[in-house]
Image: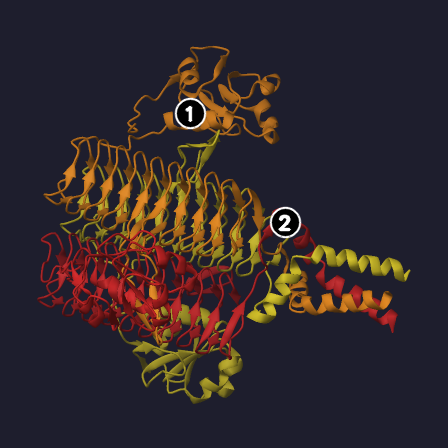
Chain colours: A orange, B yellow, C red
Amino acid sequence: MPDTQKKTKWTLAELAREIGACVEGDENLSINGLATLKKAKKGELGFLANPKYTGELKETQASAVIISPEMKKYCSVDALLMADPYVGYAKASRLFRRKPISKTGVIHPSAVIAKTANVHSSVHIGANAVIEDNVELSEGVTIGPGCVIGAESKIAEYSVIYANVSLYHEIKIGARCVIHSGVVIGADGFGFANDQGKWEKIAQLGSVHIGDDVDIGAGTTIDRGALDDTVIGDGVIIDNQVQIAHNVIIGDRTAIAGCTAIAGSTEIGKFCTIAGAVGIVGHLVIVDNVHITAMTLVTKSISCPGAYSSGTGMDEFESWKKNAVRFRKLDTLVRRVKKLEDRNN
Amino acid sequence: MPDTQKKTKWTLAELAREIGACVEGDENLSINGLATLKKAKKGELGFLANPKYTGELKETQASAVIISPEMKKYCSVDALLMADPYVGYAKASRLFRRKPISKTGVIHPSAVIAKTANVHSSVHIGANAVIEDNVELSEGVTIGPGCVIGAESKIAEYSVIYANVSLYHEIKIGARCVIHSGVVIGADGFGFANDQGKWEKIAQLGSVHIGDDVDIGAGTTIDRGALDDTVIGDGVIIDNQVQIAHNVIIGDRTAIAGCTAIAGSTEIGKFCTIAGAVGIVGHLVIVDNVHITAMTLVTKSISCPGAYSSGTGMDEFESWKKNAVRFRKLDTLVRRVKKLEDRNN
Amino acid sequence: MPDTQKKTKWTLAELAREIGACVEGDENLSINGLATLKKAKKGELGFLANPKYTGELKETQASAVIISPEMKKYCSVDALLMADPYVGYAKASRLFRRKPISKTGVIHPSAVIAKTANVHSSVHIGANAVIEDNVELSEGVTIGPGCVIGAESKIAEYSVIYANVSLYHEIKIGARCVIHSGVVIGADGFGFANDQGKWEKIAQLGSVHIGDDVDIGAGTTIDRGALDDTVIGDGVIIDNQVQIAHNVIIGDRTAIAGCTAIAGSTEIGKFCTIAGAVGIVGHLVIVDNVHITAMTLVTKSISCPGAYSSGTGMDEFESWKKNAVRFRKLDTLVRRVKKLEDRNN
């Protein structure tokens, strides 16, 4: 649904219905905002998802809280009970957005829209946006100011594109996607053949296909494929400044945190969680349910679910330096130990 | 102050006054530019901050140089003496900028400015910039071409926003800030709750608060907070393509070099220096005066000032490979050594 | 040459001439597209560059393939024979681009062009682009929608700048360059002097000079120099989200993969290949023909051609963790081994 939430107060009964919780207390209590347990004031709703913060629950000034049933005994205010309070918080958060993010059917006069573009009557297009030939914008789509949507691209219903996003030609975006500012989708993959020292450009004839319910963070770049398409599955969430190279395939519901880079033609399964600043080399296959920890360099295919890491830990510089120096002779050290073992036998 | 420097020649006396130095030589010597010691020509001013380049000082064709008093004996041209010549160079550099960077009071006719926006008469707004509802632009602010400044955002006096910057709604920028092209401030933090495999978006209800005298480099992204704000202190300097996640707090005067990523809710103290390509995981606390070296992954809070590092050193590939292979069995190696020690006792 | 390819079908004879191959089979066979061996249909052209895929060659439905002469025996369709089929594929790919990427001489009425700008009659400028004072755009240049080209900048013939690129003032771009969306060229280098805790900005008085035939990927940032220029040589290819700091010098034909960061004043030779997510510290000198592997941190100058690496390999988390813990005591371990050796002697 487009987010045009104008309602600013909710009763506990209404909230319970929206987020899937049970009311413990006054069904008619009015809530006007969301806050942390620590900073919540009267009239606001807090939540406890991590038992580490139970102390804050006991002392909160919030009028009500979202908690799990086991936490009831620590709670002296009205409550919305549910098994997963963090999910409840997520659903509640969307009710308290202060501004509508779409202006249904409003097209700013400064927007430049090709006559051949097919724009649903409910679409909102911001100032100075550029919509090129044969673009299709479905029901409820929002295009922010300064965006450039390339020829033949299609954006499905209720997707929101924030300001200054650049889509190249023939890009397919699914329904209910969110694309943040500065994103570039469909630039040429980094394809070059080396002809005796000179780089011959390989035209990237494929495209990018983004599924439904995909979130793409600010500054992220997703390149078009060389021949086949680059494909992002349904429900994938991608943080800021992620780089996705040509012909990468990301499985449904996988999450990729900030500043991660995935090189060309690598396939990543579903339900994976890739932490920030990870590097994944090209032409690998990673199965479903794999977790990669922060700043890991993935150089081989991964065929078993589980967690994977690389790197050393952090240390005080002087201490780290001594160990880093020794790393250069680690192979030698192993041989020295072998020699000692041989001598001992 | 807005930088509208048109004066192209300065006497040594004038320069001395501007940068806080003493003249050694002809007070009326005219200087028309700044250059390295190596490439300086007659009429230009050089500087020596690093004794490593004393040879270049002896041979320079510059008409004058900024040096520390100890370097006088190596210097055969006129000089501006001060304790910290690098600071003197910094101050001098600003006098020799060739172009004014603001056109006071000029608003390009193509700029799209909401009627409800509050724009000081001295503000300069470039072509095709978009200023949304209730934005406040204080005295001397410059907004570059193609910028999008979201509703309710406030930019304090003399801040300069270069071309194609995207500010979301309700962002607060302090005075005398510099924000380079491609920056995105106030996109949603990467907040999602996992509801049985499906990602539930957490609306980011907080904002971003940038202090005074903050410099933000090209392509950097700073996300809005989930409930509380993301906060950048006064005098913070941030390089290009840095990623600052929701609810990060950066203390005054901290410096962050290029491509560093700081994850959500981490607090960094004052006067820290974070090198390039560093990763800092979320929910940590780092005290004042901490230095993190390049490409370090910080995974724990840091409670003592000092320098911290991670990683191995660089090596020729073949040599590195042998050592990297041995790293996979480092724990085993320690046990083998323990066994040998036990046998020896 | 500007890429205005409208021809959609090519005979094998024509293709052979364009890409430098010999026809093996029917010279008049008509080809209408390019595809992978696996997915090619009748009428399409495939290629085999990697013997690993010889199986796909045997089974391909393509009407013709680009192969090396040794592969003839595995091939049952018409062929274009050449020593380097990958180069042949690259050249063929450019013939099958579906859309012209330049509209010669078309300047969108919404583009904002300074009267003092010098724009060749064949230049194409897209909607809402901003061309500032004294900019020079040579024959065949394409400027995409939403670009901002700063005052005094010069772009040489047939260079293509995609949408939403930001060039600062006095930037020089060579001929036949390709610059993708979101790129920022000429922002201030990260120059600051520390004056007793306070950061004094160093105005960046240099510029950026990009050579001929340079490719720059989406979101890449290249900063202007402090006094001298930042210089990118001819034929350099740069991937997405690369950060190039002030006064870096990149030698001709060097290739830099995605998300790599090169710090200030480092000089890199010709024909180098720098993988993705590499970090190179400042003030280094790297000779020609050096290869740096992914995610390596380069902290010293490199004076010998060859390959260089840093980091550990990847491992399952539990296993990695044990080894990472031991790394903190590697120096101690070496001393323990030394003790054992001494005892043994």
Cα gap from disc 2 to disc 1, whole angstroms: 36 Å
Residue at 21% x, 59% y is C96
In this rendered view, identify the residue nearer to me: B184 or C190: B184
Q: Position of residue C303 (x, y in %)?
A: 51, 79
Dividing the picture into quadrants, the one containing residue A342 is bottom right
Q: Do the residues at pointers 2 and 1 share their chain?
A: no
Disc assigned to residue A92 = 1
Image: C241 above or below C271: above
For mark 2, name the chain.
B
Identify whether C39 is placed above or below C47: above
Q: Residue at x 36, y 67 (%)?
A: C73
**Badge 1: residue crowd in 10 Å (few <14, some 14–19, many ≥20):** many
Amino acid type at mark 1: Ala
Residue C221 location, quadrant: bottom left
Question: Which sits in the foreground, C310 or C114?
Answer: C310
Determine which of the numbered discs, if any, sits on residue B303 in the image: 2
Asked whether residue B18 appears in the rendered view, the answer is no
Crowding near pointer 2: few (<14 within 10 Å), some, many (20+)?
A: few
Label 1: element kind: helix
Q: Chain of mark 1?
A: A
Question: Residue A345 — which label?
Answer: none
Q: Is residue B197 visible?
A: yes
Could you say where residue A73 lies in the image, as x and y percent from the top left?
62, 17
Q: Quick one: B241 or A308, which is closer to the camera?
A: A308
